Image (cartoon, helix red, strand yellow):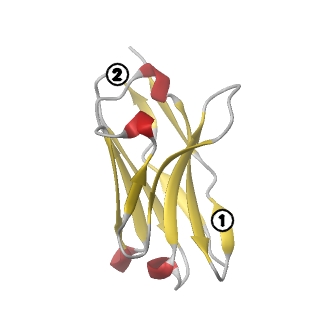
Amino acid sequence: QVQLVESGGGLVQPGGSLRLSCAASGSIFSISTMGWYRQAPGKQRELVATITGGGRTNYADSGKGRFTISRDNAKNTVYLQMDSLKPEDTAVYYCNLWSGVTGTLWGQGTQVTVSS
């Protein structure tokens, strides 16, 4: 059974950076599309970025130019580098995996708070 474990969240000042990591168990990681989503209080969960098994990336407009998604298939890990953070980036960030074998899976989430 595939499990996703996120790490790297925390409190950062506006303009700062954080790197989130999501480690996946299982042997299907390299063929899976991975993504990061976020959910702020009182709002719906929204897409942040995705990356396919072949490395093709897609970003929501909110993070273009500031966020970078990447993956290391040898480590079964996907990353989200977040730079120039803004208070409106405050949310719980969730790792997502999709494959034809597993369907959609979610991690437990990691809190990111951007505040001075």
Tag 1: residue type? Leu
State the CA–CA distance, disc 1 to disc 2. 31 Å
Q: Does 111 sit above or below residue 12?
A: below
Of tags 1 and 2, the one toward the viewer is 1
Question: How many dots with numbers?
Answer: 2
Residue appearing at x 50%, y 58% in the figure: 35
Residue appearing at x 39%, y 38% in the figure: 63
Mark 2 packing: few (<14 Cα in 10 Å), some, or many (20+)?
some
* Most foreground residue, 4 or 32: 32
* Most foreground residue, 12 or 102: 102
Tag 2: residue type? Gln
Q: Indicate the position of residue 44 as horizontal and vertical percent values.
A: 69, 35
Residue 11 horizontal side relative to residue 104, left or right = left
Quadrant occupied by the C terminus? top left
Q: Indicate the position of residue 36 as horizontal and vertical percent values.
A: 50, 52
Quadrant occupied by the N terminus? bottom right
Q: Indicate the position of residue 83 as horizontal and vertical percent values.
A: 29, 36
Q: Indicate the position of residue 12 as horizontal and vertical percent values.
A: 37, 27
> Is disc 1 in contact with disc 2, using a CB cutoff of under 8 Å?
no
Q: Which residue is mark 2?
A: 13
Q: Check residue 105 in the rendering and tell me which mark sits there, or answer none.
A: 1
Q: Does 54 sit above or below residue 105?
A: below
Residue appearing at x 53%, y 83% in the figure: 28
Residue appearing at x 38%, y 57% in the figure: 79
Mark 1 packing: few (<14 Cα in 10 Å), some, or many (20+)?
some
Dot 1: what SS? strand
Dot 2: what SS? loop
Mark 1 or mark 2: name the one nearer the start of the chain: 2
Q: Check residue 115 in the rendering and tell me which mark sits there, or answer none.
A: none
